[in-house]
Structures are given as structure tokens and as C-alpha cells.
Image: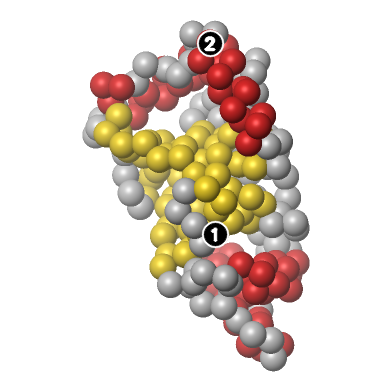
Amino acid sequence: MIYEIRTYDLKPGSQAEVEKRFGEAYEKRKKFSELAAFFHTEIGALNQIIHIWPYESMEERTKVRAAAVADKSWPPDIKEFTLAMQSEIYMPFAFSPPLKPGKFGPIFEMRTYTYPGGKLPLLMDNWEHAIPERIKMSPCLAMWYSDLGRLNKFIHIWPYASMNERMEMRGKAQGSGNWPPSAKAKKDGREGVAYVAQENKIVMPSAFSPIQ
């Protein structure tokens, strides 16, 4: 399984119209493959939309995208509103849950960390030891590492009912001494791995997003 994360920077004030056009076009696009999630940013880099597409493989992605374009119903016409576009391919950790439709939010925190090259196996080990206790407090929807695009990136997505719940759960997790994963590794006498850059976004789902 792979996940394509497409991030578009939009002109200010255009988000509502862009989401409207995406929603209308998606009604025909989804016969080829279904969307996992469609978000817009609320905190962090503003005027962004983020759509996440799951595929079984790169081969399936190529086939599906070609079929959608040939159908002439995709992509939606949003050129007049688009300032920049970015596409990245992510792979899930073995213990990352499959991204399925459902109501989880409506607040979603997307945290993206960049790590030194060659540290992915150690990062996986740190998370595999720490995540079981952390998700007893609140769920994690995604734990993915970049495979195409900017490399050595790791993204994790956390849903919350509100910003207050986010603060409460994060405080509880950090107070446990077992979070973040590097803290638990140190506590257990194992080697931890430190990130070299962090990015954080609070996003909310569009009306047609399968994940709400």
C-alpha cells in the first residue's frame, strides 16, 4: 500500500470554490479509485488543500490516473486559483493502521518530521515500542515515511474532537514519561533518534472527505 499526499497552495479566498469544484469532479473520479481524505489548513501554512489517495502500488496509481484523465472528468479546473502543487509518496509503517473512512475529528493534526539519512529502521523501532501506550489515550490515523519526493520525512496524523482535547491528550502523553518515542527509548535504555526539522498543521476535512 502507498499513499499519495498532494498539497496545493491556493490564492487567498479561493478555498471554498476550489473545494466545490473538487467535490463535483470527485463524483465521477471515484469510480476509478476512492479518495482517503481531503483537508484544508486551519493552523500552519494557510490557503492549502491536502488530498490523500491510497493505491496498492505505483503501477496502480499510474493506471488509475491515466484512466481518470482519459475520462475527461478529472482533474477539476482550478488553475486560476493554484499557486503551487506538490506530490509525495508515502509508505506506512508495518504497525500503522489502514486509513479507512469514518468520523474521527473534526480536528486533525498533521505532524511532519525530517530525520537524518539512514535512521528509518531506528525510527520505526522507537515508534513500535512507544505507540501501543500512546494510542490508548487517543488514536493515530497514520504513521508513514516518504518514499518519493522529499526523503527522510515521517508524517503522523492525529484526530481530535477539539483543540482542548488535543492539549489534554498531548499533556497526558508527555506526562507519562513514555512519549515522545525518543523519551521512551531513553527511559528503556535503548538508542533514540532525533529529528532535524519539524512541521505542524491543523487541518479540517471538506464536506466530501471520506474521513471526517
Disc 2: CA contacts within 10 A as few (<14), some (14-19) or many (>=20):
few
Q: Amino acid at mark 2?
A: Ala
Question: What is the quadrant of residue 71 in the picture?
Answer: top right
The answer to whether residue 141 of the structure is visible from this angle is: yes
Query: What residue is shown with label 1?
Result: 154
Horizontal and vertical percent position of residue 43: 37, 50
Query: What residue is shown with label 2?
Result: 70
SS class, disc 1: strand
Residue at 64% over, 18% down:
32
Question: What is the quadrant of residue 103 in the picture?
Answer: top right
The image shows residue 131, relative to residue 206, as above or below, that is below
Residue at 45% over, 19% down:
75
Q: Quadrant of the C terminus?
A: top right
Circle on res. 12? none
Q: Quadrant of the N terminus?
A: top right
SS class, disc 2: helix
Horizontal and vertical percent position of residue 179: 61, 75
